[in-house]
Image (tube, rainbow, N blue to C red):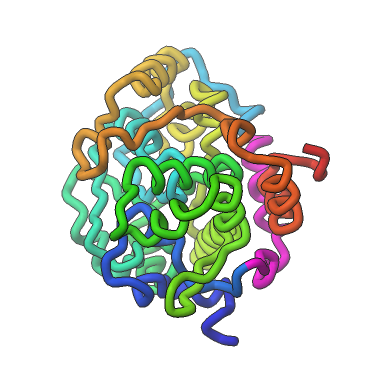
Amino acid sequence: MFARDAWIVQAMGLGHLLDGNHDPENAPCIDPTMPGGSGLLGIPDLSSLREQLQAQKGDSLMLRTPNKPGDRRPPTPLVAVSYPKSGTHLLSDILQLVTGQEFYWPDHYPSNAISRGVLDQIPRGHFLIGHWHANDLDLFEEMLNRSCKVIVQYRDPRDQITSFYHYYTKVVATSKNMFARILLDVSTEKALNRLITGGTLVKDVEFPSLPVNQVAWLEQWRRMCVLFHIPICFVSYEEVVNNKVDTIGRIARFLDTPLSREQCVTIARLTQFDQTSVTIRKTAVAKNIKRKGIVGDWQNSFTLVNKVVFKSVAQQILECLGYESDDNW
């Protein structure tokens, strides 16, 4: 039972034990957190996470971006994390323009599990970004000692699943890829259900429900930052897309680099979907990794069956993250 506990396995970052050849995009999503089809197992009380997300969204509505920039301080040591297929490259592009720093995205850590010493490896004038687990006490102690701040990005689990599906069936659809193998042999409807519920791979290796895995990942970051008194800012992909200027302003204020509305508008324009991503250009990822970049695209892929399955597995997660108030969707 110990090895199947969603929170223990997630926190320890044990996904690297399953397969020695992970694609960087899928590493956080393959922890054997629970038996297939039992998506709600392992989810604790999410009320604290929900309250913090709601409080930060309320603050963003009250603190509008000023017309003139405020006093800028020296760059704040920053660790940015984003759940896979939640707009990580877009977040990185925005942060580079807000901070005037470059990104540092090391990909040699197994299962995206980083530990003590990684902050020493960050080149001067860079911030750390990736899909990292909040799984190492020493790392958080080091971040506390350096007065780091943390930005965490998440996404509507329905859109995250949809993007995840298209990535592994279109961009990296090879027989060597674990997720491609389990998604290409069935219909889109069945493939999405597999990602919603989790399932079993060859040799009885199990992968989790992606909605459950995402909220576990979010809650672990929240818990660890609270424990170590590290400032944390949650940002949803939907805020970045639908309310970009004010969201950029909120990020800038959080990092003690307040910008004027005109500066935020400029950053929003430079990071539009049709613009070349600086982060994608500098990383070894497929050039067609960008697909649509829109909110609500899951509606073009989910069938009635997918909706029923999702509601049975992860309705409380949608409500926790603020995407739905009930199951009437």
Kindly identify the residue that appears in the image at 39 percent across and 54 percent down. 180
Q: Give the x, y percent position of residue 165.
A: 47, 46
The residue depicted at 50 percent of the width and 50 percent of the height is 232
Q: Nearer the viewer, residue 193 or 329?
A: 193
Q: Is residue 160 visible to the viewer in this orientation of the structure?
A: yes
In this rendering, is residue 26 above or below 113? above
Front residue of this view, candidates 286 and 227: 286
Residue 51 seen in render: no
In the image, is residue 118 above or below residue 160? below
Looking at the rendered image, the quarter that the C terminus falls into is top right
Q: Quadrant of residue 325?
A: top right
Residue 190 drawn at (x, y percent): 59, 52
Tell me if 39 is positioned left or right of 65 in this view: right
The quarter of the displayed image where residue 99 is located: top left
x and y, in percent, of residue 134 in the image: 45, 64
Q: Is residue 63 above or below residue 206?
A: above
Number of marks in the rendered image = 0
Q: Which residues are magenta?
A: 37-59
222 in the magenta segment: no
Residue 155 picture location, percent across and down: 55, 42
> What residue is rendered at 67% in x and 40% in y?
303
Quick one: quadrant of the N terminus?
Answer: bottom right
Q: Residue at x 34, y 48 (%)?
A: 173
Left-right relation of 182 to 20: right
